[in-house]
Amino acid sequence: MTCVFRFIKERLGALFLLLFLLSGNVGAENGEINLTAAEAPKLQNLATDWWQYFDQATEKERPKRVQELLTQLRQLPYPSADNKIPDIEQALKKWENTFIAPQPASDKQVQIPPQQEQYSIPAMLELNDRLQTKNNDLRNHRDQARQLDQSLSKLQAELKILKIDYLQSTQASPDRYPILLDWIYTQARLAASARERTLTQKSINKLAEESSLLRNQFQYAQDHLSPQADPEPATPEKLAAAKDQTGKLQTDLEKLGLETTSFDTTTDEGNAQSRLNAQQKLLLTTQLTNAQLQEINLQSSSWLYAILSPERENLDYKQIRDFIRDARDLISQFSKEAEQWRVQTADERSTANVAMLNAMEQDADQEQLLQLSEQRVNLADDTLAIITKVQRSITDNTLLLDILRSKSLRAQGGARAAVSAVTDTAGEVVEFSLDSLRKPLFEINETPITTLSIARFLGILLIAWVISRIMRGTFRRIARAQGGENAGPLFVIRRVLHYTIIIIGFMIGLSSIGVDVSKFALIATALSIGIGFGLQNIINNFVSGIILLFEKSLKIGDFVELESGVTGEVHEMRVRSTVIITNDNVDIVVPNSEFVSGRVVNWTMTDTSRRTRIPFGVAYGTDKEVVRRAVLDAALKVPYTLKDPKRKPQVWLVGFGDSALNFELVVWLTPDAVKRPGAVNAHYCWEIETALKLNNIEIPFPQQDLHIRTAPALISLLGEAAKEPDPAISKAEQRMVDPPK
């Protein structure tokens, strides 16, 4: 009965909590309770709306109520509560700090620079920089809001489970206090996250408004650029000075490359000196890149101001388009290199810091290593600063080039602008296609393989196949002129030449994509292992095919009979197999190894003529000369008979059968008839039977004499006539028929 009451109590408690949550008393986002009154929570029997007491607290009441809760927690009769109380105190402190932290003044007017009537290029770039900064901040705040939303969803689910577990537990339950502590801790974290989410949303709204206003002002600045608004416009003197600076840095970098000496990298000092020298090169490289970007900036500004000025009729727009195309190529290259330089320099700075700390921990003998490490760190910092300037300059120059292109097309107007736009678009499409083809897909022996290299490899193979086809066609025509396309050494040369050209083309194709062909020894080793396991039959058939080509024991057009009983004409000889066509027009693919290791009967290997034998029989007593003349006449009527005086048809008496004289027609066949044994045999048999019939020569059938020794049933059937002895039968025969009893 107690168990039944306890079960009913637990289910009623869970049902009550579910109805309470669905009634809207608990906030959907932060767990806040919307009640008019709030009482201090009692930890002995905590109410589900206990957080309302803290949520309704004023700024002065909030710290006091938090301390009251912590005091109650420390007085709980649960020894393990001391382990959980610091976490709860930290969560409550975080919630309090959300009210102390400065809040975004979303209700105040957004502060942006005042709008000007005309803008200079530096002012426009400054606006763009502020816009990008605002957009980055807005993007970061939105990412933070998404993370907070995920955290809130998780905390809400945990809080519901803890409330249900607490209501289902009794005061005497050992799990009541752990659930209580987890409930309070989760509720404090949920309130702090909800408060932080609200503040983040206010910041997002303000940043979005500022970004929108800055974007509008930036668009206005692009449309109202003017040389008069720039106090220090780009002049030819500034451009010449920038070019001089670029040339000087280029010379310094070349000198540093020539002055490079070899260092003993096996020692710490030598390794540090080598790394310092490499970092100096990288610093000069970044400075040179920054100078080149500054030169592009000045040239772009000069062209842009020239287009905006009234004296723009004499501008060379083709020169401007070429400048934009070349500048974009350089900027694309610099953008990729700058990211690599940043990663490389950051790694170098980290390595130099570790080396400096190790040198500081060791004896004074490491003073030189310490100085080198400090120089490396300083150079890395300087390099990172220059890289930051380079990346910012890349952004500014990209924007300037886009504006310059747009203004130049607008200034040209009409058909010239359309032609220029089409030309630029076509160039961009071609450049994009080439860049896509140059992207690495995978690597072979640390050699990147691109789509373009694969196309080049396939092109070389195609050229090799075309050359092989032309060469084979030439040799085929020569062979036809000599009377046999597939006979003689020209066929062997044609096949070997095909394989050789394809292999050479394959090796050249690998070399064209950067694969070291000399390393194919490893591949040969792996191939030999593969031959020993799975490729043995394939290699065996390939080698057998080469042997057949050079041995000339088999050629296309031969009529062969295999050990398995297959007969047919050789139609095609491939690398791995040979195709045989039977007289029933059935293609049979036979592995080449079967021709080498097995017994093969080649009916036309050395001579296309062949002698065949057609057996037949006649009755005893028939004139042999009549048989010979009749059968020879019949053989001459068959078109398959070879008309050669030295190879005349013959009729042989080959034996005495049980009921016939056994003859054979021995006849030499024409080359075409050799490959048709079934049809030839049928034709000769037909003519022989016709000739024998015309000459009244009997073709006997098997006969047997039956001697009956005793047959009582037969005697009774025949009657007395059967008992009278035949006078023609001797006494010995009579005894055999009716032996004595």
Image (cartoon, grey):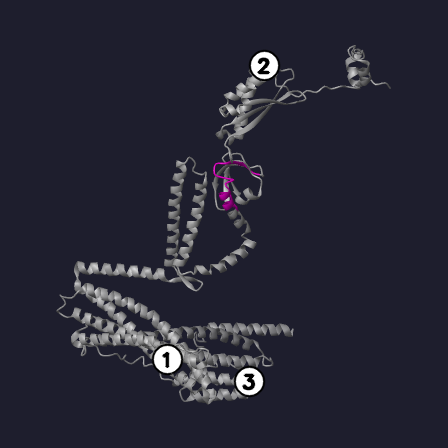
Q: What is the distance, in whole Å, between disc 3 and disc 2 at their CAs?
A: 129 Å
Q: Local crowd at mark 2 within 10 Å, few (<14), some, or many (≥20)?
A: few
Q: Nearer the viewer, mark 3 or mark 1?
A: 1
Asked if residue 36 can be seen in this view, the reply is no
Residue 654 x/y as whole percent: 63, 24
Residue 696 sits inside the magenta stretch:
no
Q: Which residue is mark 2?
A: 696
Q: Which residues are magenta?
A: 544-562
Residue at the limit of the structure toward the top, as seen here: 727
Mark whose residue sits in front, 3 or 2 = 2
- Which circle marks residue 380 in the picture? 1
Which residue appears at 58% of the width and 86% of the height? Answer: 79
Dot 1 or dot 2: first in sequence order is: 1
Q: Which mark is residue 81?
A: 3
| 716 relative to 484 in the view: left or right | right
Instruction: Decide which of 361, 227 is in the foreground and name it.
Output: 361
